Image (cartoon, rainbow, N blue to C red):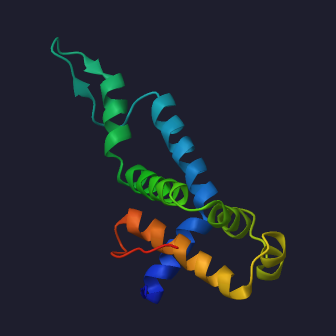
Amino acid sequence: MKINRAIFCYIEYELYHYRKSRKMIAEMRDDIINSSSAGKKEIQSDCGLADSTAAKASKLISSPALMKLEKNVGAIDDGIARLSDVHKQLFELKYIQNKEFDYICDMIPISRRSYFRLRKDIVAMVGWYMGIVSDVMVD
């Protein structure tokens, strides 16, 4: 299976920024929950009073930026969960710890060919869960 280079790079970008995205999700949620008001729009309750809790809940489920981050982080979590332990080790070393190619091959240990195959498997599986890669076959 061939993945378009731009799509491959986008998925890898999301993989490299996985921890940052998780942190941003937590910060955005905290900002919404702890804000004194959920913005200009407040939801009116049946008795005519403004319901700030409902407004915050509405913002939590309707924020486009938050929804995109959650979708991508969820796709990474689901994709990595379906892969082997060797794939998970490569994900941790390459995308989380930002280790060099030679270091990764020595630590796991795997060949150069296996490194690139495993990397492609990770990108393909995560891309499938993101909905931007159609066919995924992982060994």
Q: Nearer the viewer, residue 113 or 127?
A: 113
Q: Residue at x 60, y 48 (%)?
A: 23
Residue at the top extreme of this rendering: 47
Q: Residue at x 27, y 20 (%)?
A: 50
Quadrant of the frame with the N terminus = bottom left
Q: Is residue 5 above or below residue 82?
A: below
Residue 43 in the figure: left or right of residue 72:
left
Residue 42 in the figure: left or right of residue 100:
left
Q: Is residue 57 above or below residue 90?
A: above
Q: Nearer the viewer, residue 96 or 28?
A: 96
Q: Nearer the viewer, residue 64 or 96?
A: 96
Numbered label tally: 0
Q: Residue at x 35, y 53 (%)?
A: 64
Give residue 78's position: percent from left, percent from top: 47, 54
Q: Residue at x 36, y 47 (%)?
A: 63
Give residue 106's position: percent from left, percent from top: 84, 76
Give residue 47's position: percent from left, percent from top: 17, 11
Residue 113 in the figure: left or right of residue 138:
right
